[in-house]
Image (cartoon, rainbow, N blue to C red):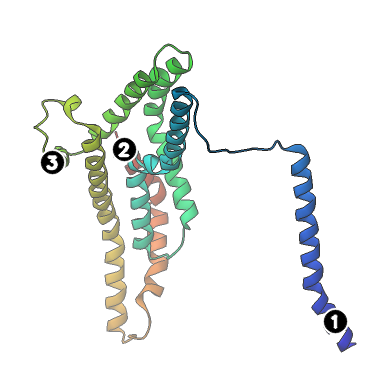
Amino acid sequence: MKIGNCLVKKKLPIVFLLCAAGILLLAAGICAQNLPSLNIQVGKSDSPQELAITVQIVLLITLLTLAPAILILVTSFTRIIIVLSLLRHALSTQQTPPNQVLIGLALFLTFFIMMPVFNEINRDAVQPYMNKEISQREAFDRAVVPLRGFMFKQTREKDIALFMRAAKLPSPANESAVPTRALVPAFIISELRTAFEMGFMLFIPFLIIDMVVASVLMSMGMLMLPPIMISLPFKILLFVLVDGWNLLVQSLIMSFQ
């Protein structure tokens, strides 16, 4: 019986591999029957129009690749995700909430906060362009205006002046004179500063709890007991009692008003 069981155990991986190979072959056969083929060729273009279309496709693919970075850097996402991450460190909960939950919450809050800007872009740029009322260049210029307005509200003049000096540009007379290439990095470092300020305020009450627990344990002679094991439940209890998630989200939303 033992010999038979060993033979069965040795044959099980082979059976699984054969089943997996059969499923892959069946899926490949179905895809080959139902999906159209795609051929990509590299050759000489017969006209400048073909080359221009190719360049446009390459630029579009590049833009789609950079879309996540654009979403992170020119919207409210940076501030939100940093504050949520600092909150998790202040609570000392390691990987709770997990990264997927924090990123998902940050994305939905970003869409909520940026929705007025997105609606303005859709109304003034996207829809007229889709209706062939304006050109592509004019649509881009219109789309940048509300986004620049949002960034200007959250950016310090000191940070804008820093990048204007670094680019050796004259002092701008108004907001329209500030180039986007100087506004975007200024907006990013302003968001980082604001996020760390909010994170510092989050750390204060939890730091006090850690200090009190550590002092009590030391006075009781429990030097071998990690203070974080005792302070963690109290920090979670404090955060729940004050309705911390509601207050935190409210503070994040109001910080962009």
Mark 2 crowd level (few <14, some 14–19, many ≥20, 10 Å Cα): few
Q: Residue 27 bears which disc, if any?
A: none
Kindly identify which residue carries mark 2. Answer: 254
What residue lies at 38% left-to-right and 18% top-to-bottom? 124
Q: Which residue is mark 1?
A: 7
In the rendered view, does 217 fall on the left or right side of 129? Answer: left
Q: Residue at left 32%, top 46%?
A: 79
Residue 101: percent from left, percent from top: 49, 52
Closer to viewer: mark 1 or mark 2: 1
Q: Nearer the viewer, mark 3 or mark 2?
A: 3
Using the rendered view, name the quadrant where residue 15 is placed. Answer: bottom right
What's under tag 1, amino acid-wise?
Answer: Leu
Q: Is residue 225 visible?
A: yes
| Residue found 63% across the figure and 38% down from its top | 39
Q: Amino acid at mark 2?
A: Met
The picture places residue 55, in percent across and down from the top left corner, at 43, 32
On the question of residue 243 being in view, the answer is no
What number is the disc on residue 158? 3
Q: Secondary structure at mark 3?
A: helix
> Comparing marks 3 and 1, which lies closer to the viewer?
1
For the residues labelled 1 and 2, say whether their Cβ atoms are less than 8 Å apart: no
Q: CA distance from mark 3 to mark 1?
A: 75 Å
- Which of the image's four quarters has the N terminus? bottom right
